[in-house]
Image (tube, grey):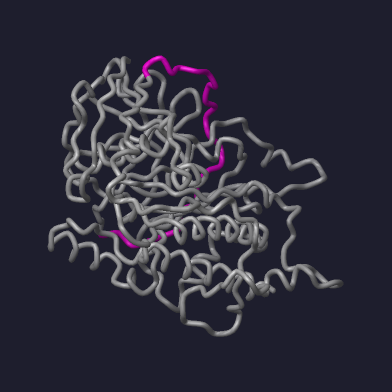
Amino acid sequence: MSTTQHPVIMQSSLALGRLELPPGSAAVTPRPPAKDACVQRPVVPQGPAHLNGCVPLTHQVAGHKYGVDKVGILQHPDGTVLKQLQPPPRGPREMQFYSMVFTADCSDPCLLELQNHLPKYYGTWSSPDCPNDLYLKLEDVTRRLVKPCIMDVKLGQRSYDPYASQDKREQQIRKYPLMEDIGFLVLGMRVYKVCNDSFDSYDQHYGRGLLKDTIKDGLATFFHNGVSLRKDAVWASMRKVQRILHWFESQTQLTFYASSLLFVYEGLPSSPSPLPPSIQPSLTAKAVMMSSTGDGAGDHEGKCVEEGAGQGELAEHNNNNNIQVCDYSLASRYTKHAKAVSHCANAVETSVSSGVCEEDNSPYNGNGNSKSLLEEREGEGGGEGLIDRSDGASEVEVRMIDFAHVFPSEGHDRGYIYGLKHLLTVLEQILCDAA
């Protein structure tokens, strides 16, 4: 697929909300609103909708699902993830955000640092059979994992952008009235259970049912494998969330609404002895959820669903001939809105700095100078340590996803920062309870 470059200048947040596809790009046909699926069901591809060997994403935990909704997520034969472009203005806005951050000539240190917290972007893709349907081609961050545990957490104190209608605002508030107080919402997750070699899946209704006094236990569910709490995965996740928080505290260029963090860790525990035949690794392609920002809500109750562990094998070959690489000099769009940033946060290796094991209803209050209880426990001699890093702690990812509601800013994204701090507080409380 040929690519035509068209410079576009973002002159205001409102203009960003009205963006359309540049001339020469394939049109995006508006889609009807998606319906939420309470239970993730296997999807049987039908005929030409298979799109050149692409298959529905089997590991998706939230958002529009291919075969259930008309806009969904696919797995490309080369192992990447294909997220179908949403109707304007959301789809073009998300495409241009990715293009701006990953443009080859990007020199903004803040955006270069941001790349570390996103799935890699490989341009857009479309099938010769359906050239009018554009997909964002993204990294599958679970690809190297055998039993990927995945959780989608929406961040921020509100899930609607400044240009949403009053009806839209009221709809989003009704979905989760505690969003402003808690600062995040669990949209879905799947957790590997070692005892029976299967996955438990939890949908959006499970997350909406979590209250202030149950949010800690609700999050802890994601890190429990049926036998024990994966403290190593909690600890590693906190470290990565802390780095994302440092990035947000150092930048004033962008504000994110209805965006999520994708948590991923290896569910299969490391073991020096051979694994039982029932849980020998299968060389299946592991697909990560890049959820569409679906807003539809069903009337089902949230529940845990046990999934079978077996998945069909996916061929590993390259079929990128139709990639359309977007390079519209998008970094320049934010020039009028970006304040001078002397430097962006480098990769921060300092661990979480907070002492919140005792009752603390305020958001995370780490100051970066004093040791947290986590660090102190790790430094103590004798006894069982708080963290066992030998159990796959390196196989943990936390990435930012879903950028259909990202706008230029002239100040800190306080709603997102609030959510990150409270999320860190809850994660550390989970570790404290385990200790």
Q: Is residue 7 left or right of residue 18?
A: right
Q: Where is 270 relative to 375, above or below?
A: above
Relative placement, left or right, of 62 versus 230 is left
- Give the vertical position of 63 relative to 54 (above or below): below
Most frequent secondary structure within the magenta stretch: loop
Q: Is residue 206 visible to us here?
A: no
**Magenta residues?**
299-322
The residue that appears at 49% across and 23% down in the rendered structure is 78
Residue 2, quarter of picture: top left
Indicate whether residue 324 is drawn in magenta: no
**Residue 367 on image: x %, y %:** 57, 72
Q: Residue furthest bottom?
A: 359
- The quarter of the rendered structure image containing the N terminus is top left
Q: Is residue 321 magenta?
A: yes
Q: Classify 412 as above or below 82.
A: below
From the top left corner, tell me how far across and down residue 390 is, in percent: 76, 53
Q: Who's the residue at 60% across and 58% down the image?
A: 239
Residue 85 appears anywhere in the view: yes
Labels in figure, total: 0
User: Residue 258 placed where, x, y %?
Assistant: 32, 55
Residue 435: where, in percent of width, then height? 69, 74
Say which residue appears at 61% left-offset and 40% top-offset: 145
Question: Up-down: is 8 above or below 267?
Answer: above
* Residue 95 occupies quadrant: top left
226 vs 23, left or right, is right
The extreme left residue here reads 166
